[in-house]
């Protein structure tokens, strides 16, 4: 392999190919391409993880260390640093939150060991700091580590002197931009891996703060549930994402028809320049996806949290997207006058409202006749196991409590199903998943009743093709896949069918 690769599509194809390769021996060219691949922000972490781990395991020393990392009583040794001080491992560790307990154990061991060392291993040091940032500092830390980090911060504040490695050590444990001495740090002129770390941990958060402060309020905020939810997302913007593949332009009816060739789309009215409302846009993933899929459209993205909106605005500017307007508001009292939309997305907000169906009704009233909605609601069946965990641990909110909770879950002899959920590996996402301040769960009969009440026609679920094929095989006389009573039968047999959410398209009847 040679030459440059600039196109996200080419990187995506390369990652797919790498994912299928069976590596048999170390190869400098493969090592370099995997390292470069790990640094591509257009690639989702689950695509990078398998080939990188398979390649690293070719090294017997790494393989032995990885096997040790599976032990609940794993003890990281200073000599293990040599095994992990590899440019590929550093690039891999820096590109996203961990997705497996053994990897988190290795990184926490590296972090703890480097905290006691003032020199060397700059790339690995910065990579661990970036991994900790990506997890939003979900890694457990010992009292000795806490004391050492506090002493480091006090020394920097007292002397005004800080080395590159001091900053990396601090940023591996705490939000750098919130340090009392952070305003005195230069934001430019850093070298090598420290440049990326300063950008991620200092410049970008400060930019988000400025952007969030500039976003206008379009409603009052006096609903008690909304105020509680707002406070959670100000402290824990959700999700704090880094990598996202670009989407190709495609009219939404075509997106639906691709998955559901027999969807009942008669009467759908779709504009070439659609007006789109993203309700509960969070940190901007949905809004940016909508802007890329509908580049000629106009998008209004609304959320309660200024911190989330600042993050979303920064990512939008970085992507060069100009057709999104962000605003801060509460859906309960959202009033946009005579404005109506071709598409309203509410894929993760209704179940966090005091009265989800009332919120849904308000949003449905903003859809043009023949317009579309994309809805997300939590499944009571799929989340029963989470309810059991909540009953055991109670309601946790502070970072310290959630770190302790995660450590307990990772230390259990019987592996928890939480360990297979990517949200577990990030502080904000873990809080959102397990300890949200407000959550309502639904079943399919409730959704069917709401659709009838709101004058909405069900068009289909957003599910992987294999799950849709299972439905087809079981219910061949429903080619449109719109019989919710049959979907309820399938869910009774597969309790985790909607483990993420019920996500589906509906049309507003004319």
Image (tube, grey):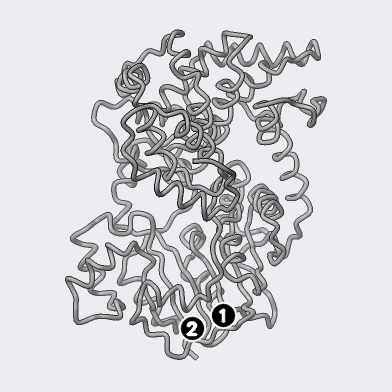
Identify the disc placed on residue 253.
none
SS at mark 1 in the image: strand
Question: For the residue labelled by badge 2, is the local secondary structure a helix, a strand or a loop?
Answer: strand
| In this rendering, position of residue 435 left or right of residue 148 | left
Query: Residue at image x 79%, y 31%?
Result: 188
Which residue sits at x=50%, y=22%?
86
In the image shown, does 188 or 494 lie closer to the viewer? 188
Camera-side residue: 373 or 438? Answer: 373
Please determine whether, in this image, residue 390 is positioned above or below residue 292. above
Marks 2 and 1, how far apart at CA: 7 Å
- Residue 435 in the figure: left or right of residue 324: left
Rendered position, 40 above or below 448:
above
Q: Which residue is mark 2?
A: 508
State the residue lying farthest toward the front.
2
Tell me if I can see residue 50 in this picture. yes
| Residue 220 at least partly seen | no
Label 2 with label 1: CB-CB less than 8 Å: yes
Q: Is residue 209 above or below residue 359?
A: above
Label 2 or label 1, whichever comes before in sequence order = 1
| Residue 50 in picture, x, y percent from top left | 37, 39
- Residue at 49% across / 18% down in the picture? 110
The numbered disc on residue 367 is 1
Q: Nearer the viewer, residue 435 or 150?
A: 150
**Percent x, y of residue 292:** 60, 64
Toward which corner of the image does residue 196 lie, by quadrant?
A: top right
Residue 252 point in image, percent of width and height = 50, 75
Q: Is residue 474 left or right of residue 347?
A: left
């Amino acid at each position: 392999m040679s030459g440059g690769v600039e196109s996200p599509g080419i990187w995506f194809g390369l990652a797919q190919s790498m994912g299928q390769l069976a590596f048999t021996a170390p190869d400098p060219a493969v090592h370099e391409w995997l390292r470069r691949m790990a640094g591509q922000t257009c690639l989702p972490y689950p695509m990078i993880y398998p080939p990188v781990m398979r390649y690293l395991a070719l090294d017997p020393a790494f393989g032995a260390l990885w096997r040790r990392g599976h032990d609940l009583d794993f003890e990281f040794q200073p000599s293990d640093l040599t095994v992990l001080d590899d440019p590929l491992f550093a690039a891999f560790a820096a590109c996203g939150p961990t997705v497996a307990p053994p990897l988190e154990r290795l990184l926490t061991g590296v972090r703890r060991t480097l905290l006691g060392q003032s020199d060397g291993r700059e790339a690995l040091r910065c990579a661990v700091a970036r991994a900790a940032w990506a997890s939003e500092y979900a890694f457990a830390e010992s009292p000795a580590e806490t004391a050492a980090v506090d002493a480091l911060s006090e020394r920097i504040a007292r002397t005004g002197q800080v080395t590159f490695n001091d900053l990396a050590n601090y940023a591996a444990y705490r939000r750098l931009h919130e340090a009392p001495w952070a305003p005195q740090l230069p934001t430019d002129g850093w070298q090598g891996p420290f440049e990326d770390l300063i950008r991620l941990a200092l410049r970008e958060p400060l930019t988000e703060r400025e952007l969030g402060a500039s976003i206008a309020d379009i409603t009052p905020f006096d609903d008690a549930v909304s105020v509680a939810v707002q406070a959670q997302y100000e402290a824990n913007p959700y999700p704090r994402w880094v990598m996202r593949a670009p989407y190709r332009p495609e009219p939404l009816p075509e997106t639906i028809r691709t998955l559901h060739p027999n969807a009942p789309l008669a009467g759908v009215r779709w504009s070439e320049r659609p007006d789109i409302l993203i309700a509960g846009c969070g940190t901007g993933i949905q809004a940016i996806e909508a802007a890329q899929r509908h580049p000629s459209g106009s998008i209004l993205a609304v959320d309660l949290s200024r911190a989330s909106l600042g993050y979303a605005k920064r990512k939008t500017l970085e992507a060069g997207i100009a057709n999104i307007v962000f605003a801060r508001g509460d859906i309960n009292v959202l009033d946009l006058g005579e404005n109506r939309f071709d598409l309203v997305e509410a894929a993760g907000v209704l179940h966090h409202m005091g009265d989800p169906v009332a919120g849904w009704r308000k949003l449905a009233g903003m859809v043009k006749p023949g317009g579309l909605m994309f809805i997300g609601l939590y499944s009571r069946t799929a989340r029963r196991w989470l309810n059991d965990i909540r009953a055991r641990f109670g309601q946790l909110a502070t970072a310290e409590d959630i770190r302790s909770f995660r450590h307990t879950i990772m230390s259990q002899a019987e592996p928890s199903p939480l360990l297979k959920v990517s949200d577990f590996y990030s502080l904000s996402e873990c809080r959102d998943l397990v300890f949200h301040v407000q959550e309502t769960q639904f079943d399919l009969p409730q959704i069917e009743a709401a659709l009838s009440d709101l004058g909405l026609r069900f068009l289909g679920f957003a599910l992987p093709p294999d799950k849709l094929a299972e439905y087809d095989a079981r219910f061949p006389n429903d080619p449109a896949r719109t019989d919710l009573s049959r979907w309820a039968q399938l869910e009774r047999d597969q309790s985790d069918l909607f483990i993420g959410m019920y996500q589906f398209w509906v049309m507003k009847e004319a």
